[in-house]
Amino acid sequence: MEESLMEKTLKGMGIETSLLNSKQIFTREETERIFNCSHSTLKNFEKRDWIKPRRFKNKNFYTKAGILNCIKIQAPFEAKTH
C-alpha cells in the first residue's frame, strides 16, 4: 500500500506512524516513542498545553487525537486550495 503524503511528512519529522496508527490510546512510553522524544520533552509539551494526558490508575495515557493536535501545533501545515 502506498504511503500518503501526510504519512511521509510525519515520518520525515521523526514520528513513529506505524505505532500512531495502531490504536487510539497510548501509554507515556508509547507516546515518547511516537514522538521520538525523552520524558522531559513530553513533560514540556504538557506544560505548554500542547498535549494533555488522561490519568487512570495513577498512569498517564494519551489519545491519538491529542498526539495529532500536538503535531499540528508544532508544525502547522495549511492545505493549499486551487
Image: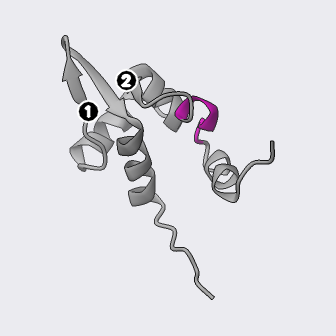
Q: Amino acid at mark 2?
A: Arg
| Contact? badges 1 and 2 (CB < 8 Å) | yes
**Quadrant of the snapshot with the N terminus:** top right
Residue topped by disc 2 = 28
Image coords of residue 35 (percent x, y): 50, 37
Image coords of residue 64 (percent x, y): 42, 38
Q: Could you tell whether 65 is left or right of 1 in the image?
A: left
Q: Which residues are magenta?
A: 15-20
Give the crowd class for mark 1: few <14, some 14-19, many >=20 residues within 10 Å: some
Residue 37 vertical position relative to residue 29 in the rendered view, above or below: below
Q: Could you tell whether 52 is left or right of 34 in the image?
A: left
Image coords of residue 47 (percent x, y): 22, 43
Most prominent secondary structure in the magenta stretch?
helix
Specify the label residue 53 is tagged with: 1
The earlier-in-sequence mark between 1 and 2 is 2
Q: CA distance from mark 1 to mark 2?
A: 9 Å
2 drawn magenta: no
Q: Amino acid at mark 1?
A: Pro
Residue 35 vertical position relative to residue 3 in the rendered view, above or below: above
**Quadrant of the image occupied by residue 32:** top left
Residue drawn at (38%, 44%) of the image:
65
